[in-house]
Image (cartoon, rainbow, N blue to C red):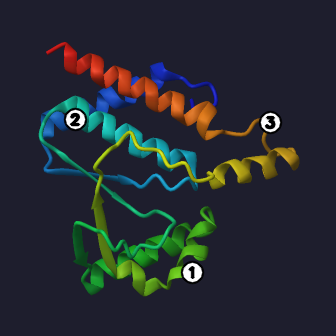
């Protein structure tokens, strides 16, 4: 979807999520932060933001650090997991470590105890995309060079046009009311 900039699929995902938000009226939705580490994480944040904006249900959009330090100094919501919830979270992370090698890296880098506290930061502007170099571009380049991928996902070429299409769709929907 990202490489092909498939807006039809993207819009269907946003529409489905927006409908669920309208029906359920949650107080908040929490998405991945856009960290430039994985384009799917960045796209998830855009999808959540577009759905919240489209739903008009008063739902607040928050994000959490996926691979960056979980200690968000500007977190708006902070709560400590009890022992059972923390143990379940760490056990689940370790169970998935074989499929997601980043889990071991994050636990090693930040320490398991850093994940005892959940920190969510309110998303002020879901359309914001960092200008910092995206790590996923470097990873993609390495994988293309190793003949594992045929193309590199580029922020400017792939993610920004998808974001812009979402912005236009949300604006069009807002003007329809």
Q: How far apart are labels 2 and 1 at the CA level?
A: 36 Å
Q: Residue at x 28, y 68 (%)?
A: 75
Mark 2, residue position: 20
Q: Quadrant of the N terminus?
A: top right
Snapshot quadrant of residue 76: bottom left
Residue that carries the numbered disc 1 in the rendered image: 109
Residue 27: percent from left, percent from top: 13, 50
Vertical comparison of 125 with 66: above or below: above
- 2 or 1: mark nearer the eye: 1
Kind of element beneath mark 1:
helix
> Residue 90: where, in percent of width, then height?
43, 78
Which residue bears the numbered disc 3? 150
In this picture, residue 150 sits left or right of residue 53: right
Q: CA distance from mark 3 to mark 2?
A: 36 Å
Q: Earlier in the sequence, mark 1 or mark 3?
A: 1
Can residue 38 be seen by looking at this rendering? yes
Give the CA separation, mark 1 to mark 3.
Answer: 31 Å
Residue 3, by quadrant, is top right
Q: State whether residue 124 is above or below residue 113.
A: above
């Amino acid at each position: 979807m990202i490489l092909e900039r498939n807006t039809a699929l993207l819009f269907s995902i946003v529409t489905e999520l927006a409908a669920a938000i309208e029906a359920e009226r949650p107080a908040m939705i929490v998405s991945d932060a856009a960290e430039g580490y994985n384009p799917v994480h960045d796209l998830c944040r855009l999808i959540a933001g577009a759905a919240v904006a489209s739903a008009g249900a008063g739902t607040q959009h928050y994000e959490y650090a996926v691979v960056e330090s979980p200690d968000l100094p500007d977190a708006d919501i902070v709560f400590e997991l009890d022992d059972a919830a923390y143990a379940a979270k760490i056990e689940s992370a370790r169970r998935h470590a074989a499929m997601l090698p980043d889990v071991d890296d994050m636990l090693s880098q930040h320490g398991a105890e850093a994940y005892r506290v959940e920190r969510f930061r309110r998303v002020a502007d879901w359309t914001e995309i960092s200008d910092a170099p995206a790590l996923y571009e470097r990873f993609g380049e390495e994988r293309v060079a190793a003949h594992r991928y045929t193309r590199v996902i580029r922020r400017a070429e792939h993610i920004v046009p998808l974001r812009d299409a979402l912005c236009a769709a949300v604006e069009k929907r807002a003007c329809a009311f």
